[in-house]
Image (tube, helix red, strand yellow):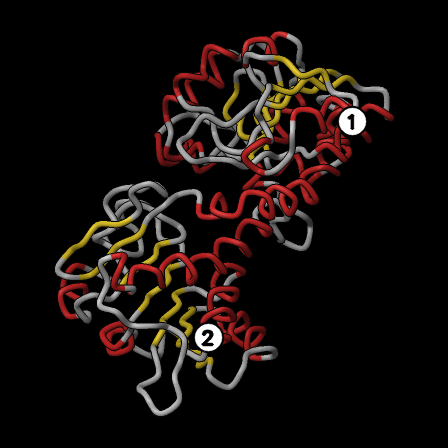
Amino acid sequence: MRVGILKEIKPQEYRVAVVPENVSQLVRDGHSVIVQRGAGVGAGFSDEAYGEAGARVVESPEEVSDGADLLVKVKEPVEEEFSLFRTGQILFCYLHSETRPKLVDMLLEKRLTAIAFENVRESDGSFPLLRPMSVIAGQQAVLQGMQFLWNHRGGVGKSLVAYPGLETPVVVVLGAGEAGRQAARVAAALGCRVHVFDINQRTLRAVAETASANVHLHNAHVVDVTPYVIEADLVVNTATVPPHSDHHVIDRALVRRMKKGSIIVDVTANLRGAVETIDRYTTHADPVWVVDGVIHYAVTNIPGTVAHTASQALALEVFPYLRALAQHGIPDALRRSPALLEGVTAIGGTLTWHDAGKFQQRPWIPPHEALKRL
């Protein structure tokens, strides 16, 4: 198969999903790889490294697409990229199509087979292509957020690193999934008093097995989050509440009661989801805004702050699935891998991702049904 690697064009997105070592293996397997110049440079992987691995390095995204059957990238295509795709190609990347109707239109019009990293799901219920970015996003949520408590970043001048004899900084983490666990681990290592909330008791028990003494676990069905949020210096939200929900974990009234100069970092960045006042996305160049004296951070590509590490971690997980797609093609790869089939957003002009169908009120069918039509 002919595999193409596109350079990301979203602002300050430096990650790449395929590293030179992966290219070497694909070439050894008998596939051809074409890489857009600069695709890995921001993550520390030179064009020369890709060339030495056996890829053909070209200048434009059009050259990549014209020479590829399977296109791999990190972030979902934006409108400027829609014209790149050819009818019948395979697209493998993060898609988050449920909130992007124009993207779904393009996938269906061009009859692409689109497989979303975030929806690839193994039989044990795990999401292997989400996990590495969740780990890094959780870690970086604390490290990025704490900077806006610093004086020279416009903050109140408070350190999240505990100092003996002084009041211990307080961090609240909403959601005890992978990102939440990592955020709690980093905050605890700084010496903070950490309060983690989740609604799943089994998840909380799993966290308890490895949590340090300064991490306190609460079931949100039983313990009210309000007094803890009011006390917090930093709140990290990793709880998934649908965009524009009628219910919020932190509503505007609670934001008004929070400490002035405290910060909310929303890892999920679902607009008006878990946090009512998260009403926009931000970038690394302009990451925060203030509501009622509380700093809000909603950067959608937090792992992009450490692109080299993030790219390596992502590539480790992506490559086995990419190799299967290249080796077997569609539909055989999907028949062989139920995990890949779970990740299919569209096949040959048919929408198969139920959340996109639900939120956009479109007809859809399950991916295994669409696969039967091929």
Which amino acid type corresponds to the residue marked 2 in the rendered image? Leu
Residue 245 at x, y = what percent?
27, 49
Q: Which mark is residue 12?
A: none
For image coordinates 51% across by 74% down, the residue present is 204
Q: Position of residue 56 (x, y in %)?
A: 71, 15
Location of residue 268 with respect to 368 vertically, above or below = below
Q: According to the image, label 1 marks what residue?
A: 53
Identify which residue is drawn at 67% across, 55% down.
124
Which residue lies under the disc numbered 2?
190
Give me the residue at 58% from left, 26% from top. 39
Q: Is residue 50 left or right of residue 261?
A: right
Q: Nearer the viewer, residue 341 or 137?
A: 137
- For the point 67% across and 16% down, the residue is 57
Task: Relative to 167, say whether 75 is above or below.
Answer: above
Quadrant the C terminus occupies: top right
* Amino acid on which the number 1 mark rests in the picture: Ala
Q: Earlier in the sequence, mark 1 or mark 2?
A: 1
Rendered image quadrant of residue 158: bottom left
* Quadrant that contains the N terminus: top right
